[in-house]
Amino acid sequence: MRIHLITATAAVAGVLLLAGCSAPDVDEPDPTPTAVQAPERPEGFPILGEPAGDDKADFQSQQAAVQAAEAAMTAFVTHDRDYEAWWAELSPLLTVEAQEAWAYTDPRMITVTQLTGPATIVDAPSSTLVVVDVPTDVGNWRLELVRAVEVGATSKGEWKAFTLMPPETTE
């Protein structure tokens, strides 16, 4: 009986040893990192950040964006009046998103008081986005202006300030 017990124990140990050597049932990822291949893009499609063909703001449109930036900053810095008057002048010059961001601003807390020079274009990546720096007494404010163009509209739309960034966020 002792021989059978030793034989049975040896058989179980052999099975366990073989079980440990078998391949797993589940495919495990290769632990060696591999380079990810960029997906192929169809011919003619731009890479993110690449200008899409001739979709650039022309000179006249860029000048309109500069004027819109200066108008928005002029309204923004003219805060020596009550909130209702300040907001009534500023809000139509902003996009809906910018209106939501600045709606609860107390104009008495704004430190910038005047524009100190003409606005300049920093970037004009498309016909609907222009980035402008506006010099003020506290430094350059950066405005991103967008132009909403309605489908089927005959006009190109109005430039509105989407973001107003103080100098400490742009330097």
Image (cartoon, rainbow, N blue to C red):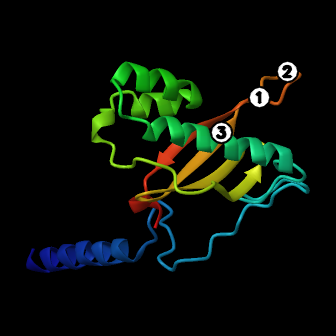
Instruction: Farthest residue to the left: give it.
Output: 2
Taking the image as shown, residue 165 lies to the left or right of residue 160, namely left
State the CA–CA distance, disc 2 to disc 1: 8 Å
Q: Position of residue 69 (x, y in %)?
A: 61, 43
Q: Nearer the viewer, residue 169 or 140?
A: 140
Q: Would you call the spot at circle 1 few (<14 residues within 10 Å), some (14-19), or many (20 or more)?
A: few
The answer to the question of whether label 2 and label 3 lie on touching residues, with beta carbons closer than 8 A, is: no
Above or below — where is 98 with respect to 3? Answer: above
**Disc 1 target residue:** 157
Q: CA distance from mark 1 to mark 3?
A: 12 Å
Nearest to the observer: residue 163 or residue 53: 163
Residues at circles 2 and 1 in contact by the CB criterion of under 8 Å: yes
Q: Residue at x 33, y 24 (%)?
A: 82
Closer to the chain start, of discs 2 and 3, is 3
Residue under label 3, please give it. Answer: 68
For image coordinates 39% across by 27% down, the residue present is 103
Image disc number at residue 49: none
The answer to which quarter of the image holds residue 77 is: top left
Q: Residue 153: which disc?
A: 2
In the rendered structure, which disc, 1 or 3, sits on the residue that comes first in sequence?
3
Q: Secondary structure at mark 2?
A: loop
